[in-house]
Image (cartoon, grey):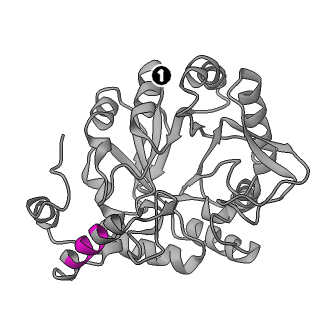
Amino acid sequence: MARYSEKVKLKRSNLEVTRMGLGTAPLGGLFKSVTDADGEDMLQGALDLGINYFDTAPQYGHGVAEVRVGKALRGAKTPFVIETKVGRVLRHVEGVEPEQWFPDAPRDIVPVYDYSADGIKQAFEESLERLGLPHIDIVLMHDAEDYIKEATENAFPVLADLRSQGLIKAIGLGMNYVEPALQIMKGTDLDIALIAGRFTLLDQVAQKELFPYALKNNIDISMGGVLNSGVLANPVAGATYNYLPASDEIIAKAKKIGDFLKERDVPLMAAALQFPHRHPAVTSVIIGPRNREELEANIENFEHKLPDSLWSELEDAGLVEKLAI
């Protein structure tokens, strides 16, 4: 069996997710437009190729990604796991300028942070409606680094109630920053955490405290942002790192890693996509293709055979931190 479509049971629920999941920020038009046809073709390709884990959010295209994902999954012939997020609600606001992340998103519908109990309920109910699905499996508290108290005291109790009623099966968080994520994890009873960009070829900070805590408390980790928003796909001037223009220093570091890998006939993308799974805390890697061609390329790189000694060689060369378990 291919590794990317191998299913792993989550520790705190009966859900099984594939080792490669599909993230849908690009499907919502992150930085660049995606047509309905390309989105539909890519989603169907993921289902056809055995991926069963789909991550989305109201923010992605201001609802566009959820609508597209729901349409595809309603026709799915095999079981799937759908994950979305709360913490923002979509509200009608007139005369809004295009935003930098999703420039093609509807101008009159904008995501607004709302970590009140009512806001969490509203976000969940509206996501169900946009998805058009009878259930949502996993709900994550989204980008709560500035709402730690609210996420812990307002959002989590609402989600815990939904979980106790069987309306959702797992609760988690989706964040780019380790320290606030760890604070929320310690203050709640989470099942899963989606951490973006913090255990990659360029940044291994998540293994210091967050991964050990997750392992000790049986919290599954999904790793997003494994290309650090683009620079590890193509480390050239103009590439993005953590969703902002990459510095010369970051581009140089990514190039140095790429050159090291090239000497060993290893594509940079292959190492980047496979790197997170070297840590036992990581259950799934979330990729974000824009079309079927990118999806298939990601799978090919994920399945690319790496030399057994590659990670230790990268460590010995000082290009990545030594694995801490």
Q: For mark 1, what is the residue? A: 189
Q: Residue 292's spot in the image, x, y percent? A: 58, 77
Residue 44 lies in what quarter of the image? Answer: bottom right
Residue found at x 20% / y 57%:
320
Q: Residue 135's spot in the image, x, y percent? A: 70, 40
Q: Is residue 209 magenta?
A: no
Residue found at x 54% / y 25%:
148
Badge 1 element: loop
Q: Quadrant of the N terminus?
A: bottom left
Residue found at x 40% / y 78%:
236
Up-down relation of residue 186 to residue 247 (above or below): above
Q: Nearer the viewer, residue 74 or 319?
A: 319
Q: Nearer the viewer, residue 70 or 240?
A: 240
Q: State which region is magenta.
A: 253-259
Up-down relation of residue 33 to residue 113 (above or below): below
Q: Main secondary structure of the magenta part?
A: helix
Q: Residue 302's spot in the image, x, y percent? A: 36, 69
Up-down relation of residue 283 to residue 144 (above or below): below
* 94 lies left or right of 265: right
Residue found at x 52% / y 70%:
49
Q: Is residue 166 visible?
A: yes
Q: Is residue 11 visible?
A: no
* 63 lies left or right of 176: right
Q: Nearer the viewer, residue 240 or 69?
A: 240
Q: Residues within 10 Å of mark 1 (few under 14, many from 20)?
A: some
Q: Residue 24's spot in the image, x, y percent? A: 61, 59
Residue lying farthest left? Answer: 316
The three-letter code of the residue at mark 1 reads Asp
